[in-house]
Image: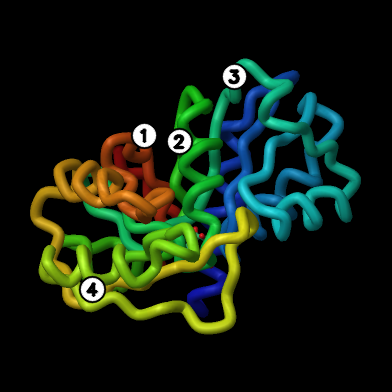
Amino acid sequence: MTQDELKKAAGWAALEYVESGTIVGVGTGSTANHFIDALASIKGRIEGTVASSVASADRLKAHGIPVLDLNSVDELSVYVDGADEITRHMHMIKGGGGALTREKIVAAVARKFVCVADETKLVDVLGAFPLPVEVIPMARSYVARELVKLGGEPVLREGFTTDNGNVILDVHGLRIMEPVKLEETLNMITGVVTNGIFACRAADLLLMGTKDGVKRLD
Ligand SMILES: O=C(CO)[C@H](O)[C@H](O)COP(=O)(O)O
């Protein structure tokens, strides 16, 4: 099976966690796109969705699935999204697609976070994947210097602007032994909007596409 087939299997498996008559939080990326395609097959059973990016909102709308403003929603039954890396503790690095801030916001409102990923995303220690940090543009150089002090090697994601109008610094060279602590530390740097460590609000379960079928870890 190809990596995309494993992503597709995980994305479709998440349908099991969609409760009828509720509003569903939807992530961003190629695995989340498979979930969106799966959601289209039961769109009459849900009240609507909240999207974590313009790209996902566009895909949902193209399927005729209602997309709601998060401010008009009290609670999401579930949030389904991919990850760039995930550990057995359900800590993740996200933001490879640059949607980390909205992903973190939508995830915060959801009762359950279902991560969908292929088996290559499961790691023992986070950090081989460069950690995305969303930064207010005028703070870019200052934040980069602070990240160097913490042992990282920040690289500006060239030619990319987030849906919020900000830039991304991808931080190489980190070996993240204490994800909760580093997530909090990075968010304290003035000018950082948020960072791609999802540990304070980890996933509740992982649906992992493997060559032997979709495995559930929680
Ligand atoms: O965090 C994300 C986007 O900001 C994605 O979930 C992450 O990059 C994984 O993407 P894919 O499913 O395409 O491998």
Amino acid type shown at disc 1:
Asp
Residue denoted by label 1 = 204
Considering only vertical position in the picture, is 41 above or below 167? above
Residue denoted by label 3 = 75
Residue at image point 68% right, 25% down? 71
Where in the figure is residue 169, as x and y percent of width and height? Answer: 38, 70
| Mark with earlier residue (3, 2) | 3
Label 2 CB sits under 8 Å from any ligand 1 atom: no
Residue at image point 86% right, 49% down? 61
From mark 4 to mark 2, how far is it between C-alphas?
A: 23 Å
User: Of tags 4 and 2, which is closer to the observer?
Assistant: 4
Where in the figure is residue 45, as x and y percent of width and height? Answer: 80, 27
Where in the figure is residue 43, as x and y percent of width and height? Answer: 82, 37
Determine which of the numbered discs, if any, sits on residue 175 in the image.
Answer: none
Where in the figure is residue 27, as x and y percent of width and height? Answer: 58, 49
Residue denoted by label 4 = 128
Amino acid type shown at disc 3:
Glu
Residue 213 appears in the rendering:
no
Per the image, label 3 sits on a secondary structure element best described as loop
Residue at image point 59% right, 56% down? 28
Per the image, label 2 sits on a secondary structure element best described as strand
